[in-house]
Image (cartoon, rainbow, N blue to C red):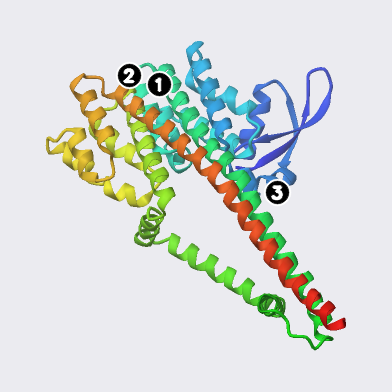
């Protein structure tokens, strides 16, 4: 959806230009005429079109999406119609892609579609969970309350993602610093010392010979590394398109000792929290389970839950069906069983998700506290090896000179 640059004349005689996002030139003209302006000229705003084509503009941040739903809930609760609420939010949206999405949603609602139907084409961006929640709210006649429940759900998910990213920032910076230091020493320091040592006939220590050989190989064959990285990226992109290969890679990820527990518990938390949201929004168990499995981030674990709807349809309870997936721990199954017998399944599922969120946070804190000294020790060993490879020959040269 392009931007149009409009030259407008107001009733008081002012003439000014304003950029507006619209599906067509005619829609842009009608918009300003409805606001009482005289439209003098309309043309495409090429500067904004160029800006909106950037990849960064195609991203909608979690906080922008949460803010969208908070504003939508407030307006609906205040008595505004859905269409007018979307118009108000769209006019204030700063993210270009979000504004474009809202404009398309607004157009679909004008044509008679419901809010959930209007958001349905954007399920890949906003998730099927969101459209299912909107549909449940529309069917129950309490859209504002359903939006409130979804906002709480989205905040918890966003906070969990933020905690994981924050926990990985410091170790990642240390690792890149270590690799950068090694790159500088190998490419600039050691090759310069190689010529200096060659003038002396003394035998170089083994560690120095190995470091020199590696440094010279890297420096003389730098293009090999570029080709290797390019090949790995192409192979990864090609494998990512195949579902079976992607499932295999996700399965291999679960073999990593520490990461296995974090990924499995994160999947359990996401599944239970999503299922709780859908059940409390008024969606029945069978379709809710099918939608909730899509919230699991690991494709291999998703494949393990593919038979859940069929098992429930055949008369099994949720706890019995989950036991067949083979990755839900006994604690979660027991709590689900309690929720089923106490007729409070939605609330108990939320409690289970909270328990696993706390366990994930504890494991992340432990990981960060362990990885920092490990990386520091790695950097120390790396620097020590470099210093030994440089200074040991100098000591030998001094002995020869004496």
Q: Give residue 339's position: percent from left, percent from top.
A: 24, 24
Of label 3 and label 1, which has the lower sequence position? Answer: 3
- Marks 3 and 2, how far apart at CA: 43 Å
Q: Give residue 90's position: percent from left, percent from top.
A: 59, 28
* Position of residue 139 in the picture relative to residue 362 (left or right): left
- Marks 1 and 2, how far apart at CA: 9 Å
- Marks 3 and 1, how far apart at CA: 38 Å
Label 3 residue SS? helix
Furthest-right residue in this view: 402
Q: Give residue 30's position: percent from left, percent from top.
A: 63, 29
Quadrant of the rendered structure where residue 175 is?
bottom right
* Position of residue 174 in the picture relative to residue 80 (left or right): right
Circles 1 and 2 in contact, beta carbons < 8 Å: yes
Query: Which residue corresponds to mark 1?
Result: 146
Furthest-bottom residue in this view: 201
Q: Of circles 1 and 2, which is in front?
A: 1
Query: Which residue corresponds to mark 2?
Result: 140
Label 2 residue SS? helix
Query: Which residue corresponds to mark 3?
Result: 50
Q: Quadrant of the N terminus?
A: top right
Q: Is residue 276 visible?
A: yes
């Amino acid at each position: 959806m392009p931007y149009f640059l409009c030259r407008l004349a107001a009733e008081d005689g002012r003439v000014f230009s304003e950029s507006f996002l619209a599906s067509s030139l005619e829609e842009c003209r009608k918009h300003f005429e409805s606001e009482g302006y005289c439209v003098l000229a309309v043309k495409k705003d090429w500067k904004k079109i160029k800006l909106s084509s950037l990849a960064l503009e195609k991203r909608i941040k979690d906080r922008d999406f949460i803010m969208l739903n908070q504003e939508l809930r407030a307006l609906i609760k205040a008595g505004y119609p859905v269409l007018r609420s979307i118009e108000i939010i769209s006019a204030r949206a700063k993210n270009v892609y979000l504004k474009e999405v809202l404009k398309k949603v607004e157009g679909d609602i004008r044509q008679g579609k419901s809010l959930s139907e209007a958001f349905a084409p954007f399920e890949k961006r906003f998730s099927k969970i969101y459209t299912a929640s909107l549909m449940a709210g529309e069917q129950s006649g309490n859209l504002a309350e359903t939006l409130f429940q979804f906002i709480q759900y989205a905040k918890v998910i966003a906070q969990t993602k933020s905690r994981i990213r924050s926990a990985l920032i410091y170790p990642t910076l240390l690792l890149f610093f270590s690799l950068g230091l090694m790159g500088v020493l190998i490419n600039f320091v050691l090759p310069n010392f190689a010529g200096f040592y060659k003038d002396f006939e003394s035998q170089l220590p083994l560690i120095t010979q190995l470091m020199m050989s590696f440094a010279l190989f890297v420096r003389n064959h730098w293009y090999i590394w570029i080709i290797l990285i390019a090949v790995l990226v192409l192979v990864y992109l090609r494998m990512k398109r195949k579902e079976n290969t992607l499932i295999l890679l996700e399965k291999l990820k679960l073999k990593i000792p520490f990461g296995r527990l974090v990924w499995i518990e994160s999947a359990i938390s996401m599944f239970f929290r999503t299922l709780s949201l859908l059940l409390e929004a008024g969606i029945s168990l069978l379709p809710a389970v099918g939608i909730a499995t899509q919230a699991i981030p690991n494709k291999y674990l998703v494949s393990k839950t593919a038979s859940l709807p069929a098992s429930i349809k055949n008369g099994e309870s949720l706890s019995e069906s989950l036991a067949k997936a083979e990755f839900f721990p006994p604690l979660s199954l027991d709590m689900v069983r309690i929720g089923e017998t106490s007729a409070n399944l939605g609330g108990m599922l939320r409690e289970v998700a909270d328990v696993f969120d706390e366990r994930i946070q504890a494991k992340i804190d432990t990981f960060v506290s362990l990885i920092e000294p490990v990386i520091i020790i790695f950097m120390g060993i790396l620097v020590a090896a470099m210093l030994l490879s440089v200074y040991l020959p100098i000591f030998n040269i001094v002995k020869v000179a004496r």
